[in-house]
Amino acid sequence: MRKISDFVKEGKIIKGSPNPAEARSLFAQAEERLKDVGKLPLSEKNASFRFEDAYEVIREALQSFLALEGYKPYSHEAVFSFALERKLLQEGEVLKADRYREIRNDINYRGKKVAAEETGEIIGFARKVIPELRRRFEMHFSNSKK
């Protein structure tokens, strides 16, 4: 994966001021979206739509950490590179999430259909990583008060 500094040089990440309010909003939105995805029925017919939603859960949660540091990403790939550099997820998890990014791009830009089984996989992955990301997110705020 490419380095964050490369994305900054290319203008795909803009450095600004830390934005805790935006970070909280993004993380809350990710958690609400995850609840919603978990309640919706999953079928072969809607699997691609549910996949996109589950992907957004992961991306929004990770993007909240960029907002905490004052970064505004203009590339989804940059979000996952950031997650790897900051060790927000384990390397294997970041690589899996990045693979989901590629699948999401195929859905959005090439009309690819995904199977319900694959969508179930990303939903399970989101359910697994969001609690750990929540813990790290809350640690940021408890550490900043010290």
Image (cartoon, grey):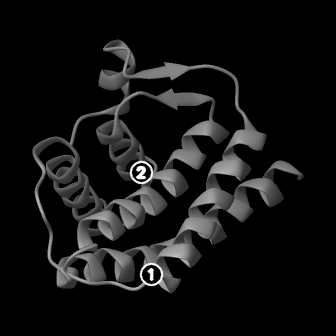
Please tell me which residue is depicted at 59% across the width and 48% down the height of the picture.
64
Please name the residue shown 29% across and 61% down the image.
97
**Residue at 14% over, 50% down:** 106
Whether residue 129 sits left or right of residue 112 in the image: it is right
Query: What percent of the width, then of the height, locates residue 16?
Result: 63, 19
The total number of labels drawn is 2
* Residue at x-position 57% and y-position 61%: 30
Is the N terminus in the top left, top right, bottom left or bottom right quadrant? Answer: top left
Quickly name the residue at label 2: 83
Residue tagged 1: 128
Write down the quadrant of residue 50 in the picture: bottom left
Q: Is residue 5 above or below residue 38?
A: above
In the picture shown, does residue 11 fall above or below 92? above
Disc 2 element: helix
Q: Amino acid at mark 2?
A: Ala
Question: Label 1 neighbourhood size at 10 Å, few (<14), some (14-19), many (20+)?
Answer: few
Q: Amino acid at mark 1?
A: Lys
Question: Percent from the top left, x then y, of residue 115?
Answer: 15, 77
Closer mark to the observer between disc 2 and disc 1: 1
In this view of the protein, can residue 23 be seen by the observer?
yes
Helix, strand or loop status at disc 1: helix
Query: Can residue 88 be seen from the camera position used here?
Result: no
Q: Which comes sooner in the sequence, label 2 or label 1?
A: 2
Query: Looking at the rendered structure, which numbered label has been put on residue 102?
Result: none
Q: Position of residue 52 (x, y in %)?
A: 34, 60
Residue 53 occupies quadrant = bottom left
